[in-house]
Image: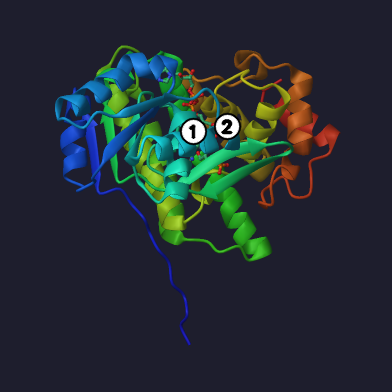
Amino acid sequence: MFQKSSWIRLPRNVVVGHGVLDETVDAVAELHLTGRPLVVTSPTPKEVAGDRVVEAFGAEGEEPALTTVEEASFEEVQRVIETARASEAGFLIGVGGGKVIDITKMAADELGLGFVSVPTAASHDGIVSGRGSVPEEDTRHSVAAEPPLAVVADTEILAEAPWRLTTAGCADIISNYTAVKDWQLAHRLKNVEYSEYAGALSQMTAEMLVENADSVKRGLEESAWVVVKALVSSGVAMSIAGSSRPASGAEHLFSHQLDRLVPGAALHGHQVGVGSIITEYLHSGETEWRKIRDALARIGAPTTAEELGIDDETVIESLTTAHRIRDRYTILGDGVSEPAAREAARATGVI
Ligand SMILES: NC(=O)C1=CN([C@@H]2O[C@H](COP(=O)(O)OP(=O)(O)OC[C@H]3O[C@@H](n4cnc5c(N)ncnc54)[C@H](O)[C@@H]3O)[C@@H](O)[C@H]2O)C=CC1
Ligand SMILES: O=C(CO)COP(=O)(O)O
Ligand SMILES: [Zn+2]
């Protein structure tokens, strides 16, 4: 008897383009959300977009509450929940980078309130996803969270953000190649459920970005357009899968481990990009990794430990211990030996 069932939770309004921040109130009105908004942001995103969102809602007579967060942690999620309760918020708007958006969607989930995603950087594919990613001690949680009801991605703001944030978003997408390979491997070896649709969408998104790499150039607002479309598409793949599997494999475990060993050393997207070069080498040996490396180099993302600003030994430690981060089977299997890690990192020129 057929007994499968699944929920695919997607945003209703995805508004992308020049100056669309000013359409946030309209995008929200369309959703029939009621009550006072709570704007969750962090210091720089507050200046570039958060204050404008607060003003726009204020002008409509619904004075928003505002809170700023500094890091992605369960304590911060709890603090946002308390702020939302104290201010009697009716829905939450996350304005900022990946950490702010993750915290907001997790708080909204716990509160049972609607969530609106307003990215200020095209730096990660959590813009649309219904997952939250939070480190805790020796592990990393990818938890179910409230997917955004609306996404408002203003390309004017995204294009003015530091260029490295955009190249990080590109690298987060390029890493989908190896994430999908890891997922397929886990399906074959461990019978992990695999979605052909989510896998194909994730892979196609990476391919399209690489094909359009020439349109991804510093100072071109079109770059923000190209990258944000890919980030949305990758987030949709995660929503279809109901997990971050289509966009997170061993290269993400490597990055999560770097976050533990050298917090804040490099951007999430840049770390997963370099991780992807190495894990592609582990998957397929001599040639394929060059395609990942060249794609990253073309958009100006780091391809070496030095460019990440991380020393060689930390890269090796991260590679040999990343499989412990979470229960997710990947090409790292039950651990890469130290000589094998060194060989892979050297062969790919990462160290
Ligand atoms: N839930 C999910 O599915 C996913 C979650 N993530 C998570 O997202 C995080 C990475 O996101 P990032 O955005 O790379 O890091 P982040 O949120 O730490 O932002 C990086 C920096 O950019 C600044 N910034 C943002 N917009 C700016 C602007 N317009 N101008 C100047 N500075 C600006 C932020 O204030 C911050 O200092 C990680 O914690 C990662 O695990 C990443 C991908 C998917
Ligand atoms: O970063 C992500 C996808 O790009 C989310 O992955 P995690 O579930 O590994 O945090
Ligand atoms: Zn990622």
- Which disc number belongs to residue 11? none
The residue nearer to you, when weighing 3 against 132, is 132
Residue at figure coordinates x 37%, y 48% from the top left? 236
Residue at figure coordinates x 84%, y 39% from the top left? 337
Q: Quadrant of residue 78?
A: top right
Dot 1 or dot 2, earlier in sequence: 1
The reply to whether the C-beta atoms of the residues labelled 1 and 2 are less than 8 Å apart is: yes
The residue nearer to you, when weighing 90 against 71, is 90
* Mark 1 Cα-neighbour bin, 10 Å: few <14, some 14–19, many ≥20: many
Q: Position of residue 171 (x, y in %)?
A: 49, 29
Q: Secondary structure at mark 1?
A: helix
Task: Work out whether 129 lies above or below 195.
Answer: above
Q: Secondary structure at mark 2?
A: helix
Q: Which residue is mark 1?
A: 172
Question: What whole-number distance in Å separates the C-alpha atoms at marks 1 and 2?
Answer: 6 Å
The residue nearer to you, when weighing 58 against 234, is 58
- Say whether residue 102 is visible: no
**Looking at numbered disc 1 in the image, what kind of residue is underneath it?**
Asp
**Looking at numbered disc 2 in the image, what kind of residue is underneath it?**
Val
Q: Is residue 125 left or right of residue 306?
A: left
Q: Which residue is mark 2?
A: 272
Q: Quadrant of the C terminus?
A: top right
Whether label 2 lies within 8 Å of ligand 3 gets the answer: yes
